[in-house]
Image (cartoon, grey):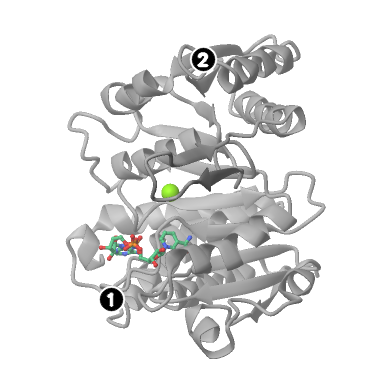
Amino acid sequence: MPTHNIASIPGDGIGPEVMKEAIKVLRAVEAIHGDLHFTIDSYDWNCKRYLETGRMMPEDGIQTLAPYDAILFGAVGSPEVPDHISVWELILPIRREFQQYINLRPIKLLKGIESPLTNKGVDDIDFVVVRENTEGEYSNSGGRLHIGTPYEVVVQNSVFTRMGSERVIKYAYELARKRGSKELSVATKSNAINFSMPFWDEVVKEIGADYNEIDAGFYHIDALVAFFVSKPEIFNVVVGSNLFGDILTDLGAAISGGLGITPSGNINPEKNYPSMFEAIHGSAPDIANQGIANPIAQIWSASLMLEHLGYPELAKKVVNGIEAALVEGEVRTPDLGGTASTAEFADKIIEEIQKEA
Ligand code: NAI
Ligand code: MG
């Protein structure tokens, strides 16, 4: 029986609440497949642990995670711990150490969800954003001098390496080919950011020479965000640097149903290290412990994990189950206008996944 070892890091706030439901879905998927097993080990690396021990994860945390096939991550963050600690001491080390250089976010309006863009439906909003996840504008390079004086100097560098740019752009072209797209849409700003962005565009053209059937569509980031709103139907695969991708994916989440829905994958394409799958939302302290968080984003993230592990048909069944539950519409969490609890909504989704099978 194929067995996959999964590390689960539920985290804080609603993280554990939605993780519990995503794991229930994985158990249902095992039963449907009949010959598949997930070993799921849970790690309590979160802000509570930080307050007790001074560390978000143990010193050998990365070594502990390394042998796993994948990591399912909930959300971290607590009002008692500065956000830069919870992010920089847990999520970012995992992304960096495991060379998860692709941040993948499907922007797909599910059936049964209304987009805030009036007149845009499920056929109009269905694309994927590929965000560079290890360098660029978020490279921790720079400095601050003469602090507090009139001579104060602040420098924040963007770092673009050839290898870092090539590998994310190649991944995006491959994805465009897989999705049968005629265009790879590229976020740039080479008119104003005059070193890194012309370089980025050049790499797109170089890599693109191996993908004759796909045109590179260059969009300045300011125009691109406007097109996400005015004509999202023109996009299939969009690639962007770390900062541009970050902004694009939050906007993408907003037009496709919001934080309770949108999943993500932090991918190491070579599979030399585990990849990590997580809802893009945070720990939502405002609704934590009430049992009302929307579990879809975490369940959909588990579906991305299934796809990564080599089960695209099971991944599809999960998304179809989510859509079927949404279309039926009666059982929903409050963020989608319903009154159901997290568990009730997840159970409804599981029921629909089982019907699909
Ligand atoms: P957030 O995503 O936690 O919440 C923003 C708003 O969306 C809140 O009103 C919340 O109730 C709502 N929301 C989020 N997820 C939902 C769900 N599944 N169902 C229903 N409603 C949902 O972002 P916020 O409030 O800015 O951050 C809270 C904490 O989470 C902070 O400590 C922050 O640093 C952390 N955070 C962690 C992330 C991660 O673990 N990857 C990502 C983003 C924020
Ligand atoms: Mg973000």
Which amino acid lies under the numbered mark 1 shown in the image of this protein? Ser
Which amino acid lies under the numbered mark 2 shown in the image of this protein? Ser
Where residue 3 sits: x, y (%)? 77, 70
Dot 1, how many residues are within 10 Å of its Cα: few (below 14), some (14-19), or many (20+)? some
The residue lying at 33 percent from left, 22 percent from top is: 227
Q: Which residue is mark 2?
A: 190
Dot 2, how many residues are within 10 Å of its Cα: few (below 14), some (14-19), or many (20+)? some
Q: 318 and 84: which one is in front? A: 84
The residue lying at 76 percent from left, 14 percent from top is: 210
* Above-or-below relation of 285 to 235: below
Q: Which residue is mark 1?
A: 341
Where residue 327 sits: x, y (%)? 28, 52
Question: Disc 1 vs disc 2: which is toward the camera?
Answer: 2
Q: 305 and 354: which one is in front? A: 305
The part of the image, by quadrant, that contains residue 302 is bottom right
Q: Are marks 1 and 2 in contact (CB under 8 Å)?
A: no
Residue 241 visible in image: yes
Question: Which SS class for mark 2?
Answer: loop
Where residue 176 sits: x, y (%)? 60, 25
Q: Is residue 70 left or right of residue 223?
A: right
The residue lying at 79 percent from left, 71 percent from top is: 63
Residue 330 visible in image: no
